[in-house]
Every structure is written in C-alpha cells, then in structure tokens.
Amino acid sequence: MRQIACESCGKSFEFDEELPRRGPICFGCHLRTIRLGFTHGKEDFHGPTIKERQDLQVAQAASAGINAAPVGTRWV
Ligand SMILES: [Zn+2]
C-alpha cells in the first residue's frame, strides 16, 4: 500500500502498487466525478433522444434513396 494526496480534495488516500487508472483522485472525489458526468448525460433527455435522432437520419437517408436501416436491426 502506498499513500498519495488526492489531487482534488487534498486528502491522502492509499492505493496498491499501481496508481488507480482514474489518477491521483480519492474514491470519494472519483464518485463525485461520476455523478457529475451522469448529470451532464441527463441533458440528452431534453433534446431529441438518440432514437429520434436515428429515425431522422434514416428518414433523411430514405428520401435520398438510401436504405439505411440502423445497424443492429438490419439482416446480416
Ligand atoms: Zn479527494
């Protein structure tokens, strides 16, 4: 076990031989970052959903004479 000061809150925390992939950030701050990212992701709900955007793309492609079925529903 080694100790390092968290880059975000300055609290020292322990880690195994290798530094966590998240960097010199304690677990508490790491969790906060995840939650922040989650809040940002929520903005997607205000705009068109991914499905709506996909439908739009397919409709545009269809009017251009292209059969652009979304990947995953198309027969392979
Ligand atoms: Zn921290």
Image (spheres, helix red, strand yellow):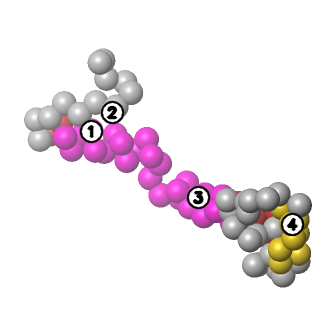
4 drawn magenta: no
Quarter assignment of residue 36: bottom right
Q: Residue furthest bottom?
A: 10
N-terminal of the two: label 3 or label 2? 3
- Residue at figure coordinates x 28%, y 30% from the top left: 69
Quarter assignment of residue 64: top left
Residue contact at pointers 3 and 4, CB within 8 angstroms = no
The disc label shown at residue 41, or none: 3
Quarter assignment of residue 4: bottom right
> Is 64 in front, or is 26?
26
Whether residue 18 is visible here, answered yes or no, is yes
N-terminal of the two: label 1 or label 4? 4
Answer left or right for 31 relative to 60.
right
The disc label shown at residue 58, or none: 1
Residue contact at pointers 4 and 2, CB within 8 angstroms = no
| Marks 3 and 2, how far apart at CA | 22 Å
Residue 41: image location, x then y, percent:
58, 58
